[in-house]
Image (cartoon, rainbow, N blue to C red):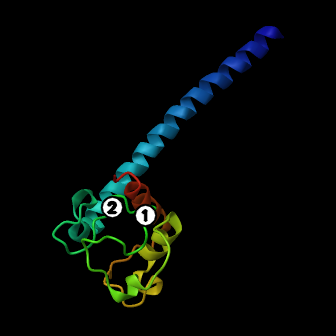
């Protein structure tokens, strides 16, 4: 019986280790997906790596946790300047889903209706420092 219990414990440890590796791989895959989505949908205006590109849109480096419409090097629309709060996961998700519903009159016209894609993009934004 002891041998059986030891085998079960060892199998559980192996599964736990394997799952930890797959979780890490899953996080890396999600980051990669977010980066690709960002490059394909956002970088044209926000710059590769979220650096603000050619000034078409604000830099997104450090956007998560930043006050909405607070960069001094970008002129925001009145619609965004009228918003209060910070760019959290929730506010970013709402804005990216439908910028005009979040802030009618905002200059951003591109949206991302797919929740999984928004989650991946926001996950990538969190890596930009």
- Say whether residue 30 is left or right of residue 36: right
Relative to 119, residue 106 above or below: below
Helix, strand or loop under label 2: helix
Residue 124 place in picture, x, y as percent: 38, 55
Q: Which residue is mark 1?
A: 117
Report the residue at 60% width, 23% height from top.
14
Crowding around mark 2 (Cα neighbors within 10 Å: few <14, some 14 to 19, many 20+) is: some
Residue 28 place in picture, x, y as percent: 41, 43
Along the line of sight, which residue is nearer the eye, 109 or 8? 109
Report the residue at 64% width, 23% height from top.
13
The mark found on residue 87 in the picture is none
- Say whether residue 37 is left or right of residue 3: left
Furthest toward the right, the residue is 1
Furthest toward the left, the residue is 54
The mark found on residue 37 in the picture is 2
Relative to 8, residue 23 above or below: below
Q: Quadrant of residue 113?
A: bottom left
Along the line of sight, which residue is nearer the eye, 72 or 26? 72
Quadrant of the frame with the N terminus: top right
Along the line of sight, which residue is nearer the eye, 3 or 34? 34
Furthest toward the bottom, the residue is 105
Relative to 87, residue 29 above or below: above
Relative to 27, residue 40 above or below: below
Residue 71 place in picture, x, y as percent: 32, 70
The Cα–Cα distance between marks 1 and 2, rounded to whole angstroms, is 7 Å
CB-based contact (under 8 Å), mark 1 and mark 2: yes
Q: Quadrant of residue 3?
A: top right
Helix, strand or loop under label 1: helix
Report the residue at 41% width, 86% height from top.
100
Residue 75 place in picture, x, y as percent: 26, 80
């Amino acid at each position: 019986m002891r041998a059986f219990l030891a085998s079960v414990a060892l199998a559980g440890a192996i599964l736990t280790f394997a799952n930890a590796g797959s979780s890490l791989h899953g996080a890396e895959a999600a980051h990669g997906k977010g980066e690709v989505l960002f490059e394909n949908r956002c970088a044209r205006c926000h710059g590769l790596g979220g650096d603000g590109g050619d000034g078409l849109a604000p830099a997104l480096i450090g956007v998560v946790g930043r006050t909405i419409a607070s960069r001094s090097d970008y002129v925001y629309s009145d619609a965004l300047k009228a918003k209060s709060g910070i760019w959290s996961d929730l506010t970013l998700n709402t804005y990216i889903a439908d910028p005009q519903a979040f802030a009618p009159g905002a200059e951003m016209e591109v949206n991302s209706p797919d929740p999984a894609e928004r989650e991946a993009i926001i996950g990538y934004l969190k890596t930009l420092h």
